[in-house]
Image (cartoon, grey):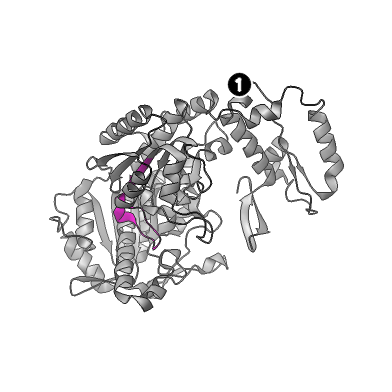
């Protein structure tokens, strides 16, 4: 992967940024956001010194030459080369307080960064806003522009799948940067961050774009109002604690509101698919009150990008038995929904759709172990009676799976497609979702044991079985609701259970 190496840290082998890329990206961050650096034309010369590293032929391999050229990498035995590098670029003492000026420089996005972002957004069909999206965008822009420093604002934008929440969020990021506001796009799930970064990376280098996208756990130590605005996409996925072991910080909602003068939360409560998801409107309002923030709410209730509009979403809710609606079948709804008796046929049809514009994929409920993570030759989703076997999403590309070459040959899971849109989606409904005599029955034990979404539920079941059953039911139903609403033009499904297949056929009719 570009600018990425595999190395041993945090107790195992992990993909991480190449040291040269790290050093160069830090310099780019200063060039893009530190007013003293870009206005006073302060020259930054990054490098990396690995004082304990003695290896050869990896870090300075030709594959990484672009970044090594921008930020030379020095290893343990290269201390003389490092000395020469420093002497070449630092010839005199700091008589003009350069370090002081950088350290105290005002944090503002540079005009070059703003102009580059604007030019990349123009003509990029991924981010064109339509109808209500444009109205909601202007509504939020007006609220941010009119905000005063001593009065926090919390803006709640509610909308279901396909309403273009992410499209609005990315447009807000670019426009606010263009107006000189210190802004970041925030999500808990890294899949949208990585995919939108790849969409926006054009004439600009990846580092400049990546610096605008942040994880929801990055605000633990932030000072009040470090940011003019934080645009929080997929706010329903926010957690209480942060960090690899969920043991850092107090509450992500609190930390985001504290760090920003204006916090914009895009939310769909029916897409909470993890035991630790706390993103509810009630929770956000509670923390807004703690900061005495003005709360502004708006809703994206129409002009869904799904061809079936909100009629299809209402049908999904009714069919998955999330809530009763009047939409008991798909008649008069312009949406391509099909049920297949064979996973092979499902895969073939989605591949045909994908040949049009590379915007169709197959996904599945997380009911199969990820064997290929340890053995690249192993198959994961195996359905013997149909001779069907596929691997989960590409291991090395993880959250960026959706836009990787060859991803059509794999099956995506909830963690790599939530928050992203396709034209057509194929969904394999696993044994965790069954229908018996017309009633949906969810089964926690059929979920993959190591799925982080349900970690802790079996322990909860021993103490409070009713609560655990209710939480599991919500997670499993919301997971399939999310998967089945990724396709803006159509959704094709295959059910591992025959009675469930017939149930869906009858519901379509």
Q: Position of residue 410 (x, y in %)?
A: 46, 59
- The answer to which of 257 and 346 lies nearer the viewer is 257
Q: Is residue 274 magenta?
A: yes
Residue reaching furthest left?
Answer: 326
Whether residue 467 sits left or right of residue 261 in the image: it is left
Which residue is painted at 36% across and 77% down in the image?
463
Query: Which quadrant of the view contains residue 72?
Result: top right
Residue 383 visible to an observer of this rendering = yes
| Segment colored magenta | 264-281
- The answer to which of 89 and 250 lies nearer the viewer is 250
Residue reaching furthest right?
Answer: 80
Q: Which residue is tagged 1?
A: 39
Whether residue 194 sits left or right of residue 444 in the image: it is right
Element marked by disc 1: helix
- The answer to which of 156 and 87 lies nearer the viewer is 156
Q: Position of residue 285 (x, y in %)?
A: 31, 47
Q: Position of residue 333 (x, y in %)?
A: 17, 49
Location of residue 409 with respect to 126 vertically, above or below? below
Q: Position of residue 21 (x, y in %)?
A: 65, 42
Categorize mark 1 by other alpha carbons within 10 Å: few (<14), some (14-19), many (20+): few
Q: Is residue 123 magenta?
A: no
């Amino acid at each position: 992967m570009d600018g990425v190496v595999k190395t041993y840290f945090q107790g195992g082998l992990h993909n991480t940024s190449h040291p040269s890329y790290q050093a160069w990206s830090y310099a780019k961050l200063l060039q893009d956001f530190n007013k003293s650096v870009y206005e006073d034309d302060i020259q930054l010369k990054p490098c990396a010194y690995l004082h304990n590293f003695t290896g050869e032929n990896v870090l300075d391999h030709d594959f990484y030459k672009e970044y090594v050229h921008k930020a030379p990498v020095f290893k343990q035995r290269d201390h003389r080369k490092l000395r020469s590098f420093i002497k070449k670029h630092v010839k005199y003492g700091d008589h003009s307080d350069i370090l002081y000026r950088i350290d105290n420089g005002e944090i503002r996005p540079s005009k070059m960064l703003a102009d580059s972002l604007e030019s990349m957004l123009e003509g990029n069909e991924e981010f064109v806003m339509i109808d209500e999206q444009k109205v909601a965008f202007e509504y939020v822009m007006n609220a941010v522009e009119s905000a005063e420093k001593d009065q926090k604002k919390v803006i709640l934008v509610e909308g279901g799948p396909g309403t273009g929440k992410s499209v609005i969020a990315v447009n807000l990021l670019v426009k606010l940067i263009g107006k000189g506001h210190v802004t970041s796009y925030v999500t808990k799930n890294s899949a949208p961050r990585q995919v939108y970064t790849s969409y926006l990376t054009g004439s600009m280098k990846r580092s400049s774009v990546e610096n605008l996208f942040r994880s929801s756990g990055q605000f633990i130590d932030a000072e009040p109002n470090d940011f003019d605005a934080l645009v929080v996409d997929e706010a329903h996925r926010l957690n209480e604690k942060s960090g690899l072991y969920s043991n850092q910080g107090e509450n992500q909602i609190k930390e985001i509101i504290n760090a920003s003068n204006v916090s914009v939360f895009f939310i769909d409560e029916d897409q909470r698919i993890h035991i630790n998801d706390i993103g509810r409107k009630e929770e956000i309002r509670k923390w807004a009150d703690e900061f005495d923030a003005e709360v502004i709410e708006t809703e994206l209730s129409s002009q869904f990008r799904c061809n079936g509009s909100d009629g299809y979403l209402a049908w999904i809710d009714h069919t998955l038995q999330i809530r009763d609606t009047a939409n008991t079948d798909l008649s008069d709804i312009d949406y391509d929904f099909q049920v297949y008796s064979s996973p092979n046929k499902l895969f073939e049809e989605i591949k045909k759709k994908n040949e049009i514009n590379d915007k169709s994929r197959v996904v599945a409920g997380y009911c199969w172990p990820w064997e290929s993570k340890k053995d690249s030759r192993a198959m994961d989703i195996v359905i013997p009676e149909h001779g069907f076997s596929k691997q989960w999403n590409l291991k090395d590309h993880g959250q960026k799976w959706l836009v990787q070459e060859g991803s059509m040959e794999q099956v995506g899971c909830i963690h790599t497609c939530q928050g992203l849109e396709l034209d057509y989606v194929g969904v394999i409904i696993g044994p965790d979702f069954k229908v018996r005599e017309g009633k949906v029955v969810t089964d926690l034990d059929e979920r993959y044991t190591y799925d982080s979404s349900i970690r802790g539920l079996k322990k909860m079941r021993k103490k409070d079985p009713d609560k655990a059953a209710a939480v599991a039911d919500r997670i499993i139903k919301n997971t399939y609701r999310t998967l089945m609403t990724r396709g803006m033009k159509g959704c094709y499904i295959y059910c591992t259970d025959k009675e469930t297949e017939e149930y869906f056929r009858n519901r379509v009719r």
